[in-house]
Amino acid sequence: MKNLFQRLAVLALATFCVLGVEFASAAPGGGSANIETTPPSHPKRSSTVKSTTHRTSVARRTKRRSRVATDPWHMTSYGNPAVEDNPAGEDPLVRQAALDALGRLSGSIVVVDPNTGRILSIVNQKLALSSGFTPCSTFKPIVALAALREGLITPNTRLYVGSRTRMNVTDALAHSNNPFFLKLGEMLGFKRITEYAQEFGLGEKAGIDVPGESAGVYPSGPPKQGGVGHLAYCGTDVEITTLQMAAVISTIANGGTLYALQYPRTPEELAAFQPVVRRHLDNLAEYIPQIRDGLAGSVLYGTGRSAYDPDLSIFGKTGTCSENGARLGWFMSYAGEQQSRYVAVVLLRGGRMMYGPHAAEVAGRFYRDLMLKEHPTQASRTDSSTLASQQ
């Protein structure tokens, strides 16, 4: 009987230990807890979490307000870019495709026929015509052509660009490599870069009697900060309009003819339209094919790959920089490998989301939408040369 009582006592003690361990462990100093007077641990922890969450929320709101107060991008990225436009005389299919591609993004699209210089559409005419903007990296193809023409590089020349990496002009254009073009700028010098830039029409109006068109600005000397290298890779101190940009890429697209851009607005003006050649860049014609691989590479695997479409051959160059409290996103481009019918220049201007790859995405939408509008039954074709050869 004694043994039975001992066994029952041991069992009772074990049961008490199992049931009471939570309370014992909660007591200060390891003693047993008074569950009536000691606050439970969970409500205390919940209060701490609430307090921490409140402090975190306040800190986040303060950080957001601070970021807004110090954010250098003071311009909105959205709006109605075409609200003040007059579309008279424009190609209606081209304009609708440009409107659809840009949507409500703050920016402009200029579409030109590179074989005649006719302006087919301008979305956001005020932005496109009234002032010039830093060209950012879209200045690089001019520098590349100058360096090739001057014999400073060949298509196979590989320059050291850092991190044990060497790059040729094709990949430098495709990836928009700044060190590569900074070196080219220093090799060329300000005077020679200026000669080629002016050959492409920078510093003069691109159009004939286009109301409100600005001539942009070309500097009289290299930038005070960064020197000629910064001019070469970012177009520092240059102000270029979307029309001038369209004239530049049109000259590359058609193989070396700089057309004066014309904007016929009435049926009579359109009927009387005749192309006007400003000059033939014969000294660059043989070098233009040497940079096309770089413009193609930008879309295939480089900074402009958001414009890529397997059914289109698109060539282009992105540009991203900032000025006057706004980010700029450029993409100058043409579609069609044989004879291009369309040049599209996209300029986005606004906040953080405005950059070259985003502009390339807009241009890609434009070309795809235009292809569908012009040839709705041929949307599955695989070569954009068909688009270029059909009227």
Image: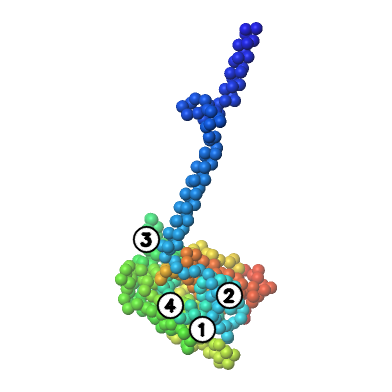
C-alpha separation, residue under disc 1 versus residue under disc 2: 21 Å
Which label number is shown at residue 339?
A: none
- Disc 4 or disc 1, which is closer to the eye? 4
Mark drawn on residue 99: 2
Residue 291 placement: quadrant? bottom left
Q: Residues within 10 Å of mark 1 (few under 14, many from 20)?
A: many
Pointer 2 or 3: first along the chain: 2
358 w.r.t. 129: above or below? above
Q: Residue 132: give its label.
A: 4
Q: Disc 3 to disc 1, how far (Cα)?
A: 39 Å
Q: Tell me the crowding category of disc 2: few under 14, some 14 to 19, or many 20 or more residues within 10 angstroms, Cα based.
A: many
Task: Give percent across and percent down for residue 12.
Answer: 61, 18
Tell which circle, 4 or 1, labels the residue nearer the N-terminal end.
1
- Tell me how far mark 4 sits from mark 1, CA to CA: 20 Å
User: Of the residues shown, which amino acid type is indicated by label 4?
Assistant: Gly
Q: Are marks 1 and 2 in contact (CB under 8 Å)?
A: no
Pinpoint residue 60: horizontal percent, then vertical percent.
47, 54
Q: Nearer the viewer, residue 181 or 268?
A: 268
Label 4 crowd (10 A; few <14 / some 14-19 / many >=20): many
* C-alpha gap between disc 4 and disc 2: 22 Å
Q: Label 3: which residue?
A: 160
Name the residue that disc number 1 marks: 117
- Foreground residue, 327 or 29? 29
- Dividing the picture into quadrants, the one containing residue 11 is top right
